[in-house]
Image (spheres, rainbow, N blue to C red):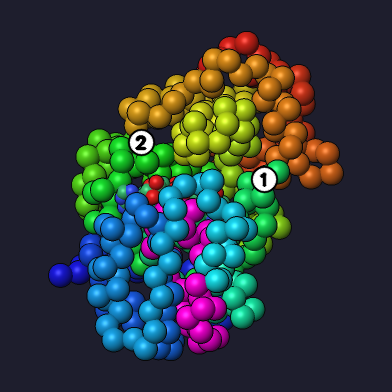
């Protein structure tokens, strides 16, 4: 029996859509049915998630004229143009027309690639996100960024393409490996730090319940995260300005991911250490007190997230990888710092000396 706990809306005019959060929503035929326009459906998942959840999504679809199941190999290394072409091969072979609906069932990799496939197929077809990792539930399924990777850069080929709905089933989190849960929680903490101080204080208190996967606490954290993301996306859908605050810690984090070789550190783990570096820099600039840096460090450690930059990574390594980041505009590095807990600001005046002092030889983020 499904239980709808929260519904919120991403307000984008005619492209507005609901985000549903609750238990057993995967197979809620009423909710899902409202967002499927025709009799054709393409479910895209991967070989880890499909055995766990695909049958239940399919059962929730009821009788449809045509249902194609595309099961991709699991992993970020398959988030490629080649995999996209395989999706199109199957969808074309089954004769899907422009009334078809693509449903993504999986983490951020499946969501990003399926969204991009939906954006491209017949110049854009209906699309529903059913995210099954915490990271996908609080971040990648909401906001319409879709993409695949290019060998020379992550998420370099893609489109802004909003889903028709997001169905978040908190029950899927019970099968998530602990490391993936912690990585998703890092992004949850991010929302508190950038734009919602009361939420951050709540997270500091409630983290043991979240780590224990208590349903009500998780649903609350997901709702607050998605509400904050929805507000930022509604204000700046295509990241002309304020949306960039969602990247707190990401420029440092991307440098760690790239330097270690993708797949060593999870994205959320690298973001955790990156957020700590961003707060340390904010404190050095006098915007936040030192004790906030120390308490974030304790919180992240309690979440089993890394709090020190990789010991073998020098300041020069950081600078090299950060210079290649998408957030470099006209040669100027743009970083998200805090003016206060719950108030982020994008700055482009951080000097190389400040970064060297922050990063050099410490092997430690705070
Ligand atoms: P992922 O999709 O690789 O999922 C992590 C692992 O968990 C995978 O092995 C997956 O198969 C498995 N998994 C998924 N659901 C599960 C479940 N319920 N139980 C057990 N295992 C499960 O990684 P992710 O962290 O979800 O997403 C990362 C991707 O998201 C990256 O490609 C990143 O670029 C992208 N991303 C996109 C946005 C955006 O705004 N579009 C934002 C953040 C991240
Ligand atoms: N994950 C950052 C964004 O959606 O803009």
Q: Looking at the image, is 221 positioned above or below residue 301?
A: below
Kindly state the secondary structure of the residue where label 1 is placed: loop
Q: Residue furthest left?
A: 1
Q: Residue furthest top?
A: 361
> How far across and how far down the image is residue 26, in percent?
28, 67
Quadrant of the image occupied by residue 27: bottom left
Q: Residue furthest front?
A: 93
> How far across and how far down the image is residue 263, in percent?
50, 36
> How far across and how far down the image is residue 208, in percent?
25, 35
| Residue 337 visible in the current orientation | no
Q: Which is nearer the N-term, disc 1 or disc 2?
A: 1
Viewed as shown, does residue 361 lie left or right of 356?
Answer: left
Q: Residues within 10 Å of mark 1 (few under 14, many from 20)?
A: few
In the picture, the quarter occupied by the N terminus is bottom left
Q: Which residue is mark 2?
A: 179
Q: Residue at x 49, y 53 (%)?
A: 109
Give the label on residue 67, or none.
none
Q: Which residue is mark 1?
A: 151
> How far across and how far down the image is residue 45, in percent?
40, 61
Q: Residue at x 47, y 36 (%)?
A: 266
Residue situated in front as seen by the camera: 213 or 353: 213
Q: Residue at x 37, y 41 (%)?
A: 180
Residue extent of the magenta highlight: 90-115
Asked if the stretch drawn in magenta spans residue 147, the answer is no
Q: CA distance from mark 1 to mark 2?
A: 26 Å
| Residue 178 visible in the current orientation | yes
Asked if the stretch drawn in magenta spans residue 99, the answer is yes
């Amino acid at each position: 029996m499904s239980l709808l706990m929260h519904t919120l809306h991403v307000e984008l005019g005619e492209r507005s859509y609901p985000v549903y959060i609750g238990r057993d929503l995967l197979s809620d035929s009423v909710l899902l049915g409202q967002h499927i326009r025709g009799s054709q459906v393409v479910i895209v998942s991967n070989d880890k998630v499909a055995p766990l959840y695909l049958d239940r999504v399919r059962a929730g679809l009821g009788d449809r004229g045509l249902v194609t199941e595309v099961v991709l190999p699991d992993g970020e290394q398959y988030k490629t143009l080649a995999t996209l072409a395989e999706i199109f091969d199957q969808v074309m072979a089954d004769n899907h027309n422009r009334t078809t609906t693509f449903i993504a069932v999986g983490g951020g990799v499946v969501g990003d690639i399926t969204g991009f496939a939906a954006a491209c197929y017949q110049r854009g077809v209906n699309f529903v996100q059913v995210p099954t990792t915490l990271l996908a539930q609080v971040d990648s399924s909401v906001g319409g960024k879709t993409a695949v990777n290019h060998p020379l850069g992550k998420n370099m080929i893609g489109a802004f393409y909003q889903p028709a709905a997001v169905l978040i089933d908190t029950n899927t989190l019970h099968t998530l490996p602990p490391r993936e849960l912690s990585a998703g929680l890092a992004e949850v903490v991010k929302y508190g730090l950038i734009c919602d101080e009361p939420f951050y204080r709540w997270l500091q208190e409630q983290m043991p319940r979240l780590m224990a996967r208590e349903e009500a606490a998780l649903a609350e954290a997901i709702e607050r995260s998605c509400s904050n993301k929805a507000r930022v996306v509604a204000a700046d859908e295509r990241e002309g300005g304020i949306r960039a605050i969602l990247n707190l810690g990401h420029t440092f984090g991307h440098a760690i991911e790239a330097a270690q070789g993708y797949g060593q550190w999870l994205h959320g783990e690298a973001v955790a250490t990156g957020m700590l570096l961003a707060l340390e820099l904010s404190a050095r600039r006098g915007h936040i007190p030192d004790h906030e840096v120390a308490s974030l460090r304790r919180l992240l450690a309690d979440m089993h997230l890394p709090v020190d930059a990789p010991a073998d990574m020098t300041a020069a390594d950081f600078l090299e990888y950060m210079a290649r980041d998408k957030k470099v505009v006209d040669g100027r590095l743009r970083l998200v710092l805090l003016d206060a807990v719950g108030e982020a600001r994008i700055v482009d005046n951080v000097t190389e000396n400040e970064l060297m002092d922050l990063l050099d030889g410490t092997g430690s983020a705070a």
